[in-house]
Amino acid sequence: MDYPEGYELVFQAAAVEDDVVIVRRTAAAGAGGYPIYEDETGIVRAEISERGEVRMLASGGHQDVGVPLLVRPLTP
């Protein structure tokens, strides 16, 4: 399966505009066998299927991981 190199994850924010986080594919796979994507800090991590289903992954002990409202593949 050929997965996109990256995605935009759109989260609802308290401010006027939503938060958009760009994640890139890593060499790792998650428990479901799909690629793990992460942002440049390594804090936002997600396993994303070929259908755009997202499972957010905690990167720290007390992290409260929200679910994105929208997932958009990055176009080359």
Image: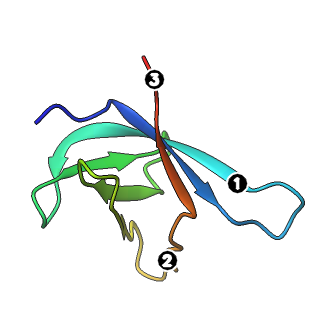
Question: Which numbered disc flags the more N-terminal residue, 1 or 2?
Answer: 1
Amino acid type at circle 2 is: Gln
Question: Which residue corresponds to mark 3?
Answer: 75
Depth check: give the residue in front, 28 or 51: 51
Amino acid type at circle 3 is: Thr
Q: Position of residue 41 (x, y in %)?
A: 50, 45
Depth check: give the residue in front, 53 or 37: 53
Depth check: give the residue in front, 47 or 49: 49
For the N terminus, the quadrant is top left
Given this view, does label 2 or label 3 mark the residue nearer the observer? 3
Q: Position of residue 38 (x, y in %)?
A: 39, 47
Q: Does 15 sit left or right of 74 as displayed?
A: right
Q: Which mark is residue 19?
A: 1
Amino acid type at circle 1 is: Asp
Label 3 SS: loop
Given this view, does label 1 or label 2 mark the residue nearer the observer? 1
- For disc 2, the neighbor class at 10 Å (few under 14, some 14 to 19, many from 20) is few
Q: Which mark is residue 63?
A: 2
Which quadrant of the structure image shows residue 7?
Answer: top left
Label 2 SS: loop
Label 1 SS: strand
Asked whether the beta carbons under mark 1 and mark 3 sit within 8 Å of each other, the answer is: no
| Residue for point 45% across, 23% down | 75
Q: How has the structure been colored for display?
A: rainbow
Outermost residue toward the front in this view:
51
Could you give the CA–CA distance between mark 1 and mark 3, rounded to whole angstroms? 19 Å
Asked whether the beta carbons under mark 2 and mark 3 sit within 8 Å of each other, the answer is: no
